[in-house]
Image: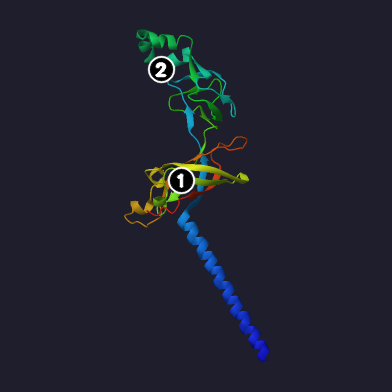
Amino acid sequence: MQGTSVIRVILINLIVIIVLFALIVAGYFYYTNATNYVTSQDAQVTGQIVPITVPFTGKLSNWYASVNSTVNQGDVLGTESNSSVLTLNPGLAQVVGRDQTMQQKLKEEETVTSPISGTIIQNNVAVGQVVQPGQVLAEVVNLGNLNITANIPETEIRHVSVGQTVDISIDGIPNTTFKGTVQSIGNATTSIFSIVPNPDAAQGSYTPVTQRIPVIISLNGGYAGKALVPGMSAEVTIHVNNNNS
C-alpha cells in the first residue's frame, strides 16, 4: 500500500509538472505572437472594381461585354443609337446643334468604352435595353492588380505600420502562403461606411464595441497561376517586429 501511495504521489507530481510546462510553453508562444505579430481572419482579396456607365439616356443598339471577357482600356463595349439618345434627352438637341464636338460625338452612335484594362466580372444589360446615367451596365477589374484588405482591431492598429511584411493565407488556395507588404492604413473605421445605423447611438445609449480599421496589403511577387479573385477570404499575419509604440 505504501508503495502504491508513493507511485500515486509521483504520478500526480509528474502530471502537475507536465501541465505547468505546457502552460509555460503556451504562455511563451502567446507572448511571442502578441509581441511580434498582429493576425486577422477578417480579410479578403480586393481590387479596384470599376463600374461602366453611360453619360446619356439611350437604347443599346449593340452590346459586346460578357462575363470573364478580357478588355483593354478604351475598347468599345457597346453603342447607344443616336436617335434614341436625342429622343430620350430632349434638351440635348439644342446643345448638339451649337457644339461641333457634340455633333461629331453623336454623329452616328454614342459609344460605351471600358475605362480600364481588365476582366468583365459582371454584366447587367443586353441589346435593346434602355440605359441611363448612374446605371451600372457592367463592372471591370484588373485581376493582375489585386491586393488584400484586412480589418485590424483598433486595439492593435498602433502596432501596424506601412512597409511591414505580411504572411497571407487564402481559404480557396490551401497549403500556399503568399507574401505581402502593408501598403496603407485606413483613416476611418469600417463602421463609418456602414449603411446600417448604430441603434444604440440612435437611442442615446452606447455599448463599446471594438472597431476595425482597414489595412491594404500588396501582394509581393505576384500570384501568377493562382486562381485569385476579388472577395476570396484570407487570413493575414503582420510581422510588427516588436513595434510596441
Residue for badge 2: 89
Which residue type does callout 2 highlight? Asn
Q: Residue at x 40, y 47 (%)?
A: 191
Q: Residue at x 45, y 16 (%)?
A: 85
Q: Residue furthest left?
A: 204
Residue 164's tag is 1
Q: Is residue 110 above or below residue 243?
A: above
Distance from disc 1 to disc 2, alpha carbons, whole Å, reads 53 Å
Callout 2 crowding tier (Cα within 10 Å): few <14, some 14–19, many ≥20: few
- The percent coordinates of residue 66 (x first, y second) are 58, 26
Please identify the quarter of the rendering in which residue 179 is found: top right
Which residue type does callout 1 highlight? Gln
Callout 1 crowding tier (Cα within 10 Å): few <14, some 14–19, many ≥20: some
Q: Is residue 181 left or right of residue 225?
A: left
Q: Nearer the viewer, residue 92 or 45?
A: 45
Q: Nearer the viewer, residue 234 or 179?
A: 179
